[in-house]
Image (cartoon, rainbow, N blue to C red):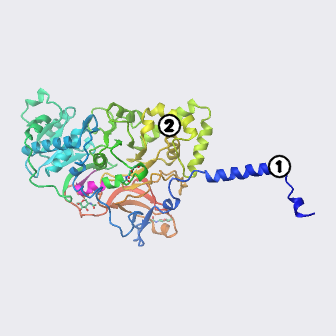
Amino acid sequence: MTISDYLVTDDLTVLLGFIGVSVFLLQNLYKPQPLVHPILLGRQSDAGRVRHSGESAVYRNYGTGLMGRFPVRPDKDVNVVTDFVKPEFDAPRTLWSTKITNAQLKARVSAFGSGIATLVPEGSTVLILLNDCIEFVITDLALSEQSIASITLSSPKLLARVLEMHPPDAIITDNTFLPHVSQAARDARNNHKLIVVDFLPPRFSETARVMYSWQEVESLGKVPQTPKNAPQPGSAYTVSFFETPSGGMRCVQLSHENFTSGVTAIKALFPAAINLSTLDTIVSSHSLSTPYGRAIAYAALFEGASFATLPSTSVYRDGDAPALDVADILSVTKFPIPSPTVLFLKPEHVQSLTSSVTDRAKKSSFIFPLAWRHKFAGLTEGFLTKDSLWDRTVFGSAREDVLGKMADTVKAIVISGGLLPSDVLVPARLALSIPLINTYTHGSATGPLFATHAFDLQMLPSSSPAAEPAHAGAPSVNVEAKLVGVNDSVVEKGADPIGEILVRGPSVGNMLAADGEAGEKNAWVHTGEMARVMTNGAFKVLGSI
Ligand SMILES: *[C@@H]1O[C@H](CO)[C@@H](O)[C@H](O)[C@H]1NC(C)=O
Ligand SMILES: *[C@@H]1O[C@H](CO)[C@@H](O)[C@H](O)[C@H]1NC(C)=O
Ligand SMILES: *[C@@H]1O[C@H](CO)[C@@H](O)[C@H](O)[C@H]1NC(C)=O
């Protein structure tokens, strides 16, 4: 037999062969590409070469490198927080319920600032007891412009202690919280001025305490005065008190530079494909009374974006806190802002959103299991889209039922302010199909301390038998982190270091001792929280000590 006898083919074989090759080629050529290069994800941060006993190495963002300098400004012209309101933007945007241009915002800031400067002497401190609103932003910028120190509290429980230990010269509050403030101030026997954002109720205007309405202060400042001392990037202008999980009180002092660094880190969360711009509407679930919440608002101001916060951010209220769920997110539609594009949410919001969308999709479509399997297969290859066949037939309408118009407009969700269970991440990615950026934040810092890459879709195997939260990525662009209290013998055997997270960097403020004494500048800050650092340089935050 000759070779050709073995190679006898008929037309059918040729055809089958042709189809086989075509399918193979199609699958390989048109296989969706991962959204981010795998090498980048394999090594997320730079670890220092030395490791002290009982500690992990020092980790930095891969982009910063071990020798690189930390970025501290989003733009070379932004030195102090009032620079976030850029004069070159002249289109109006909406902040909560108010449509306002940068020029109008600047005018209101300088009127209120000049007014307040006539009421309280230089070197005073002013306590801001306001829920999130445009007046909070104006107050905050006005005080910083006048170099008057402001104080914020992350919880109303801290009020009595702060009034006693650090009596302010003035308090700015609104009608709803006024009775509580008056009572607390009487208890602490403070002598301060009260400035009330809404109208003055008659029963209070008769009391001996000195009270001013917001309008009075603004009209006192009709003739703007240039501040006596122009604020410097390095000057501390605000102090934030926050609670530890065990109920202790901690206090951090923050400078303009600490906030410009925080905004730089927030901007760095968004790769160019989903960068922030004037077209965005940012919605946040983090109170302006926290450094991180305020930095998010500043980032929105800086980008010329519209901005609002969720009802659950209110610190000063009667009754229970609103639940962190879909209803909380949907409440922003009551503001006249354009449909939100970027959401800064808490883990509970994401869980609620995911289960609502998944339940809706399950109920409305019998091909749900098939759709789920196909999207899951894409995810394992590092690929995610909102526009696949499965989204058009199954998930799209479920998302629209739950989120309304937002289902179309939201392009990214940043998750901070708690631990995200790792088994939520995959369902959330499939249900929402937009970048979910998981971060770790702390009461002492204006920016995220750790953050995942927006397009990191890896499903990392758990390195411990117990369920651990989802990883929070690598140190942020301007943060150094290390773990202390690690077990040397375990680490020498090659296991992941586990210990308390210590951080430092320009977005971290200066921790003050209970008596208000400043600590050493740029010292390592103990977060009181544990983490595991994985071999790829990503951190898993495990909860408080
Ligand atoms: C916060 O800002 C101050 C003043 O610019 C700076 O000295 C300090 O180093 C910053 N914080 C940290 C932890 O770097
Ligand atoms: C942001 O995105 C827009 C549109 O994709 C692009 O034109 C612009 O250059 C980006 N800006 C930055 C700073 O990457
Ligand atoms: C370190 O880990 C080893 C092995 O798990 C354990 O036997 C040892 O007690 C630990 N050492 C400390 C100081 O916790």
Residue 139 - label: none
Q: Note whether ligand 2 is within 8 Å of mark 1.
A: no
Q: Residue furthest bottom?
A: 50
Work out whether residue 441 or residue 221 is closer to the camera in this orientation and state it: 221
Pointer 2 residue? 355
Q: Is residue 251 magenta?
A: yes
Q: Earlier in the sequence, mark 1 or mark 2?
A: 1
Pointer 1 residue? 11
In the rendered structure, are the residues bearing label 1 and label 2 in contact, judged by CB atoms less than 8 Å apart? no
Q: Is residue 445 visible?
A: no
Work out whether residue 192 or residue 220 is closer to the camera in this orientation and state it: 220
Locate residue 446 relative to residue 230 in the image: left or right: right
Q: Is residue 96 magenta?
A: no
Residue type, numbered disc 1: Asp
Residue 175 found in image quarter: top left
Q: Residue furthest right?
A: 1
Residue 92 percent location from the top left of the image:
26, 39
Residue type, numbered disc 2: Ser
**Segment tinted magenta in the rendering:** 249-262
| Residue at x 62% of width, y 32% of height | 366
| Residue at x 38% of width, y 58% of height | 476
Locate residue 316 relative to residue 281 in the image: left or right: left
Helix, strand or loop at label 2? It is helix
How many numbered circles does the render carry?
2
Quarter of the rendering occupied by the N terminus = bottom right
Quarter of the rendering occupied by the C terminus = bottom left
Q: Is residue 4 above or below residue 305?
A: below
Helix, strand or loop at label 1? It is helix
How far, Cα to Cα, is label 1 from label 2? Answer: 53 Å
Badge nearest the viewer, 1 or 2 = 1
Residue 446 percent location from the top left of the image:
30, 53
